[in-house]
Image: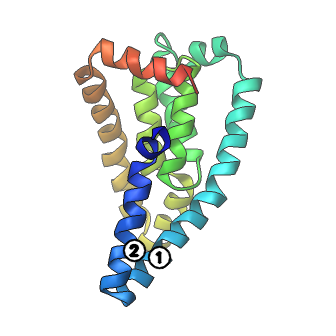
Amino acid sequence: MKYLKRYRFFLLTIVLMAIIFIINKEVGLKALNVTGFSLKEMLLVIPPVFILLGLLDVWVPRETMMKYMGESSGLTGIILAFIIGSAAAGPLFGAFPVAGMFMKKGVRFLNVLIFIGAWSTTKIPMLLFELSALGTTFTVTRLLINIPGIILIAYVLSSLVSKEEIAGIYEKAQSL
């Protein structure tokens, strides 16, 4: 019963996929293809992310992360969060295990939010594509809008979430 409760959404998804397949075989095959593609993408991205997380956990002491990205890091922490998030490659779901490790290492909540925002918006490979395909004006304009936007959203979110909720999130991150 414990496993049924734990995997209920996965099992429900399988049942729904089967129903879709029975009702409309063509749509069912498309859904199966999309699911297979997504699974393949995750299997190619997640192992390297977890290897890097293991190395980060072992090689970078908590004190170092707290010094440069912790509560008293100020502008340095914000800049590092942007650089690390922008240097990342891969889909956004790869950012969340890294964010969890950052929290485990004592990184300030604001900096974690900025890191996620930078990962999703200012990745260097995406910027290089934009420069070549859409031009310098577009890329610079988008960055000039996105960078302050990411910081503003991170400040708003970190101020809206209560200290108790943040403490709970950090507590869960410690169990990673």
Give the camera-side residue of 130 and 16.
16
Q: Position of residue 121 (x, y in %)?
A: 42, 50
- Tell me if residue 52 comes above or below residue 166 in the rendering: below
**Callout 1 secondary element:** helix
Q: Is residue 36 left or right of residue 53?
A: left
Give the camera-side residue of 79 and 158.
158
Three-letter amino acid code at disc 1? Leu
- Tell me if residue 51 comes above or below residue 130 in the rendering: above
Give the camera-side residue of 159 and 100.
100
**Label of residue 32 in the image:** 1
Q: Position of residue 28 (x, y in %)?
A: 39, 81
For the residues labelled 2 and 1, the Cα–Cα distance comes to 10 Å
- Residue contact at pointers 2 and 1, CB within 8 angstroms: no
Q: What residue is drawn where x is 46% and y is 29%?
A: 112
Give the camera-side residue of 54 and 124.
54
Three-letter amino acid code at disc 2? Ala
Q: Which residue is mark 2?
A: 18
Q: What residue is drawn where x is 51% and y is 33%?
A: 99
**Callout 2 secondary element:** helix
Q: Position of residue 45 (x, y in %)?
A: 63, 55
Q: Position of residue 9 (x, y in %)?
A: 38, 52
